[in-house]
Amino acid sequence: MQKIILTLLLTTLSLVQISCKTNDRKSVLVIAVDELTMTDVTCSQEESERSGFQLLCNESVRFTHAFTPSTLAVPALSSLMTGLYPYQHKVRHNSGPGLAAELELVSEVALKQDYRTSFFSGGAPVFRRSGLNQGFELFEDNIIPSFASLFRPFKKNSEAFLQWLKQDVGNDAFFSVIYVPDLLFTTTETTTDLGETRNLSFESQMDELDESFFELFQSLKQSNRWDQTTVILVGLNGHTSNDRYRELSPLNLHGENTQVALFIKPSQKKKRDEAIHWKVDQNVSLVDVGRTLYELLGESIVENGTSSFPSHSLLDVLKNPNSTSPEDRPILLESGWALWRKAGPLRTAGISSHVLYINDEKPLLYNTLVDRFEVNPLPLLQESILPTTQKLQNLMHKNQFPAFTSLDSEWTAKLSIPFARWMRTDQESLLLKDLKRLMSAQPRSLDILNWTAQIALNQKDWETLKQLGTKNRVSVWQYVGEKNLNGKVAKLSDSCFYLLSGVLETEQLKNCGDPLFLEFVDWVRAEERGLSKEAQRKRFERSFKNYMLDQQIQRANIAAGLIWDTSRDNVFAPSRTELALSLPEYTRIRAQVYKSIQSEEL
């Protein structure tokens, strides 16, 4: 009996020790936001009742000179999760291959230490194929896009995160990441707590995000998790101003696109009389944040002493505002977008102290101390900063980073139209004018030709569609344009269109390699084919809805600067099926199809 009692006591003691150990560990929450720069968040003295940003301003360390290692989301997130620069972890853009399985992510370290781990993605380009899913028990990237929203708003992801905490985590420590693409979607409608609809703008999305952050932070406070959690709010990249001539946002290595917001609210063992709220003005990289995450979990990154771009943990400045990292430490910035899109090589830049060196064929040099907005390039032999310039040049040469050559004018032309012009239906007529202007300047651009034809079809600008078809020998465009203009058309030699009125034979059906169009034929000629008309209608409408949603995604990708890895099979151009539905004889059917799609969305 004594042995049994002793065993029970020892078991109870062990369980208590394990419980205390679990409860003593601090949790980590990383909120990574696309397009959030340092200047987007102003810490004012004015108290706002429902501001998550102001709450962080009051209770966290603010880094005023934080830089992203990449202007693209997946490489930047990969640096956060590995503490490595893109040239080290090998993820250079938003397409595959993603992070190699050989790399041990900080999430894997957390999982080994019995942290509960989760990742909530708001949408493209952050999916599990990026390799970022490694080490996460829950990697929630099951996003169902709709015509109303192509992403999952932060508000919904934060609700899912809180539900996970409540149902699955309990009192355990957790390591979680939430990816936030909301700020890109400036044409998505948001509402205030009072139900008032905000205008469509970047500022409105910021207001929505600010309130959602506040709600999440309050929930963490109410559940007694706030003090036990290190909360990191970080921007992954910025956004290019209209004043930056001929700079595409995915390629832009200037400050407005690389200097990002960074707040770190440390966990604390006991309640402080006054919350931590100081700022750090020294240059830091998101690579440093990645290294800090490892050290928060008790792991140290052993770095090669010869590294050209050394990283530093930020743990010290979370305890004391006086940083010990070298002022002149070089930080690397890059964009692999041109390399990915076969538009040019990797673009790189280095920043050391207040000197920015952009490694172009004609290098750009700025003294950011006196030229905050980087509008006045300096000569490379500027005496006052010559040693720093030479150091950055030598580092680029040492690591064999190529000098970036200017893009072909077609790239800067076709991606110059603002996001809102592409995505707002009330601006589509203006979009068509823009595209026609670009078509005149870039007559050989197949992309601009296809995009112009698609928007002309949307706008029922039959004259433009006809002219594009005639000039570029696209007979179907010409045919549809002429038939809508006057009904008189030349004979169309298209094996698929023949199926709408000609004799239905097996050989003719085989000659049409357009599955969506064949489903349309099965519907409109169901009786002749011995098929159920209603069943074929439903089948076609389902397929056509998916096709139209794919087109919406393609369109948004163009508007965003081709930053997503969308299907190569879907080109933003008029499909044979859309063209057929635009024929006068199918007006009623077209109205039925679009009404069905709209009702499903509602």
Image (cartoon, rainbow, N blue to C red):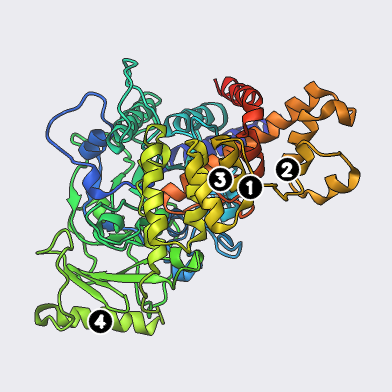
The amino acid pointed to by label 4 is: Lys
On residue 114, the disc is: 3
**What secondary structure is found at the residue carrying circle 4?**
helix
- Amino acid type at mark 2: Phe
Ranked by sequence position, the earlier of labels 1 and 4 is: 4
Residue 98 position by quadrant: bottom right
Give yes or no for contact between labels 4 and 3 (Cβ–Cβ under 8 Å): no
Q: Nearer the viewer, residue 479 or 261?
A: 479
Label 4 belongs to which residue? 391
Q: Position of residue 50 (x, y in %)?
A: 26, 25
Q: Is tag 4's residue or tag 2's residue first in the polypeptide sequence?
A: 4
Q: CA distance from mark 4 to mark 3?
A: 44 Å
Q: Amino acid at mark 1?
A: Val
Q: Are marks 2 and 1 in contact (CB under 8 Å)?
A: yes
The residue that disc 2 covers is 497
Position of residue 523 in the picture relative to residue 566 (left or right): right
Q: Is residue 463 visible?
A: yes
Question: Is residue 32 something one can see in this rendering?
Answer: no
Is label 4 or label 3 in front?
A: 4
Give the secondary structure at mark 1.
helix
Q: Image point 60% across, 41% down: which residue? A: 480
Of tags 3 and 2, which is closer to the observer? 2
The one nearer the camera, 224 or 144, is: 144
Left or right: 368 with respect to 14?
A: left
Q: Amino acid at mark 3?
A: Asp
Q: Position of residue 227 (x, y in %)?
A: 33, 35
